Image (tube, coloured by chain):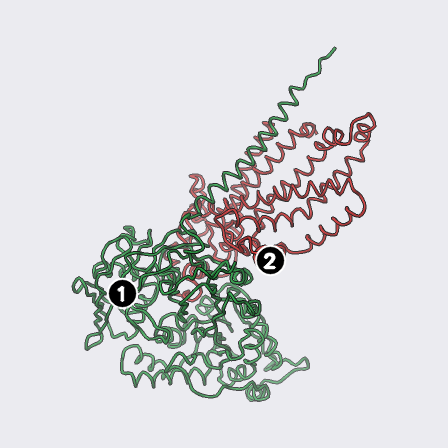
Amino acid sequence: MTELSYAAIRRHKTRIKAALAGGVSLVLCLMFVLFSQATNNNQTRSNTLAIGGPWEFTSLEPSKQGYIYTRMSILETLLNVDAKGDLIAGLARSWQSSADEKTWTLTLQPNVLFQDGSPLNASAVVSALRFAQDKHGALQKAPIEAIRVKNPQQVEIVLSQPHTVLPALLAHYSTAILAPSAYDQEGKVTRLIGTGAYLLDTFEPPHKLSVKANPTYWGIKPSIEFAQYLTGHRAESRILQAKSGDADIVYSLNAAMLDQLKGSDQVTVHSAAIPRTLLLKLNAAHPFMNQVEARQALSLAINRPAIAEQVLHVAEAASDQIFSPSMGAWYLDQPQENHNLAKAAELLAGLGWQKDAQGWLVRDGQRFQLTLTTYADRPELTTVATALQDQWKRLGVELKVDVTNSSMIPSGHADNTLEVALIARNLGVIADPVSLIANEYTHGGGDWGAMNWHNPAVDQALERLTTQSDPEQAKRDAQLVASAIYQQKPVLSIAYYQQHNAVNARVKGFQFDPFLRDYFINKMELVDHVDAH
Amino acid sequence: MWTLIKHRIFQLILVVWGVGTLTFVLMRSLPGDMAYRIAASRYGQDSVDSAAAELVRQELGLDASWWQSYAQWLTDLVQFNLGKSLVSGLPVIETVQHQLGHSVLLAFTSVLLASLIAIFVGVLSAFRQGTLDHGFLWLSTLLRSMPVFVIGLMLILIFSVAWPILPVAGFGTWQHLVLPTLALALSLAAVSNRVVRNNTLRIIRAPFYQFAAIKGLSTRQTFVQHGIRNISVPVIAFIGIQLVTVIEGIVMIESLFSWPGIGHGLAHAIFARDIPVIQGCALMMGILFVLLNTCVDLLCHWIDPRGAHA
């Protein structure tokens, strides 16, 4: 008689149990490794300021995402910018040019230490600036011949020709000053060692970084021990982070969602204008847009207040000029152009355009058809593009919308394939807009500005603005440039941007930098007795 | 079994070569200038211009012919070198390890939770035909018809805003894992519970099962001795497929919860034309696909050795 054996079944069951136990152990080990890497036990809600924003970071290089590190007060620049756009002292307490305006001398703040304990001196600054000069960034826009040590506390920058914008370039994040030990032999940044009020604590690209107070900071000593930045890709996540109290400050909220924060006694919304303009870049050599009247007609057909109110949810944001009132001499103090479809049609009729049976404008057998290129990085752009499609359709212009990567705009500019581009241009990338305007509106235009648009008077004015420092002449030239752009319409402005930020009640001393260079964490305090939870 | 493992190792080599080559060809075939795309990702939308693109072109040697680039990639691959990210400059293996670790963790916990829910609900539905089964059918249909993103948002509104016990987004603590896991698990269980239910019904109506009951075994004994193993094979195969699709397709959940996973990383790399990262991610996913399928096959083989002879 065959004896019944359960040994095989037992072995089989043991194997299954071992496999299951192995799987569970693997998951637990993975959780342990990931959580032990990421958790900083010293950070608690009461000593940590939680910041949320949409910006990712992938590199330690200031030339790439340096704005995150200056905002989080890790890195500092030689000069700073105040809320009005005026330059103020940073790591350099003073700066002055020679009589011929070709040599700039910067005097450094005394007794400043890097976060590794080494002193900030002219040699360290020169080294950092030379590394910055070799990389993409603001310094490449200046005709620099030499950067050298004048004495331990003074740095000299020698130019091949006068360049009035140089001090503004030294306030750009790409020129942030890092300690000599931050670089490897090839000049790559391997450690983030600056002079800021906070030093880098944890770095988990592309989503999270945390900083802790720098006890040797030379300026206003921070009162908050830790600060953490978390990238929130989705506008929905960011507003819920603010609403739940998960984040103390959330930058760049979607205007359409702000109603969700109404009635909250824990969260206040701070809205502020920033020097970013929503505009249409036109190819002025395109056969349909190579006459001023055609571009004017397209401008008149845009209902800006409707876009500002219905899409951007800020009625007062509508604008027909690219420079906002905060940009001083560049702003044209004049009434806004009204939406006028009849006048637009009349201008186009004058150029030979007639409507066909379907309502499209036709000339010499060709339909008035354009392709608008835009990108999805900013969600409002695609909505504005479709609004424009509808508004220009009423004029008889057929607009195809191509949503792609932002790089297709400079690329299309370079190979001359671009027709119309809808962009959100930050005119405050560099505190003094002269450099940016000169790059984008002279000699036919630039990547993010005019395209195939030539105006010798503008070229000359911007040349003077770049090389001469007479304030009265500068004002006249700025007005000349702004007027020419407004009248000849190489670009069509639609609206200014407003940034909406949510601030929790436990944060005291919140300040907003419209140039988005600094979060001023060292000037804030956390009030413990107020708790969102 | 060894034949199966040998076959899978051969498949793995083919997958590594095939996925890498296909990714390379597809990325090279996309319209637009790579240098501009990479520059936009490196320096940000406000700072991308022709000068930045030229700098990138020079630095990365983007003017090299496609076959030179391909040969270089293949040589590196043979040496187990995935290269460096064109955007961040970091080694691809570091990026992929970081992202894949988070994705695998999220996928495993979600599938584990989804399986527990699915098995409980599916078996209950099969044994309690009628109102309960119909109720679960409605609930499953409702959850399945909702994008996982919406389920995630609803969970945030309940557990982070209305009843603030869990964080909205982020990573680094176990609490951060709960909501994304639950959102994914609910979405997955909405389908898998019906698979469990249908297989359970099929088995409990089978003649061998009914015979086991008739010969005198209790309901519990019948189910444990003759039900579980027979139900398990198709269910495990289905869960294996779900696990792979979860790792690949959790971009929305990762974005919503700021979870640094590979789905989100891959989407960004594609926008940036960061070919080494895309190849690295695709390779890892391909390898994972083969490994998981092998594990599922081995598990099914253990449970039902008849499959090997079929």
Name the mark on residue A91: 1
Which one is nearer the viewer's eye here, A97 or A509?
A509
Q: Residue A250's x, y, as percent? A: 48, 63
Which one is nearer the viewer's eye here, A251 or A411?
A251
Q: Is residue B40 above or below residue B84?
A: below
Cα separation between marks 1 and 2: 45 Å
Q: Is residue B137 visible?
A: yes
Residue type at mark 2 is Leu
Instruction: Note the chain letter of the green one.
Output: A
* Chain containing the residue with disc 2: B
Q: Which residue is mark 2?
A: B153
Looking at the rendered structure, the secondary structure element under dot 2 is: helix
Report the number of numbered marks: 2
Query: What shade does chain B have?
Result: red
Q: Which residue, as the protein is rendered here, is positioned at the far front?
A: A529
Q: Going 38% across and 60% down the picture, which residue do you hit?
A: A72
Looking at the rendered structure, the secondary structure element under dot 1 is: loop
Q: Residue B137's x, y, as percent? A: 75, 49
Q: Specify whether B230 is left or right of A105.
A: right
Q: Residue A274's x, y, as percent? A: 44, 73
Residue B163, picture quadrant: bottom right
